Image (cartoon, grey):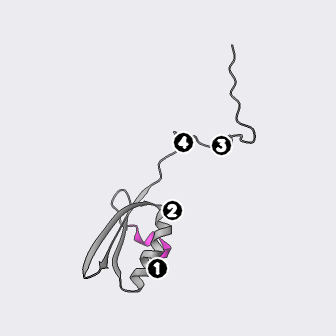
Amino acid sequence: MTTTTEAPTGTVPAPHAETSAAAEPEPLFLLSYSYCYGREDRLSARTFTRAQLDRIGPAVMWSVGRGRAWGVEIRDEAGVDVTGVFVWVYAA
């Protein structure tokens, strides 16, 4: 007995496409910086994917340019400082 599987009409998987189980997880980066909140200074340290960093990074640098944030640091999963890899860091 032979079993065939059909893709829904209009969706044919590309022969070179990886399945989600075989795809590697996206690398994560730790973005940390200090910022003022009222009368106190706070530290923000959050993990983002590269795409997320490219969206939020310019907003952080906007705050840096106005003196509301400072000490921006980006580290990869191994803990290596990769701040210089992101072009938006220097656009402020």
Q: Residue at x 70, y 24 (%)?
A: 4
Q: Is residue 87 above or below residue 1?
A: below
Furthest residue to the bottom? 66
For disc 1, the marked residue is 90
Element type where label 3 sits in the image: loop
For disc 4, the marked residue is 20
Single out the mark in the foreground, 1 or 4: 4
Which of marks 2 and 1 precedes in the sequence?
2
- The x, y position of residue 71, in whole percent, is 32, 77
Give the residue type that dot 3 points to: His
Looking at the rendering, the stretch of residues picked out in magenta corresponds to 82-92
Is 58 magenta? The answer is no
Which of marks 4 and 2 precedes in the sequence?
4
Q: Are marks 2 and 4 in contact (CB under 8 Å)?
A: no
Which of marks 3 and 1 precedes in the sequence?
3
Give the residue type that dot 2 points to: Ala
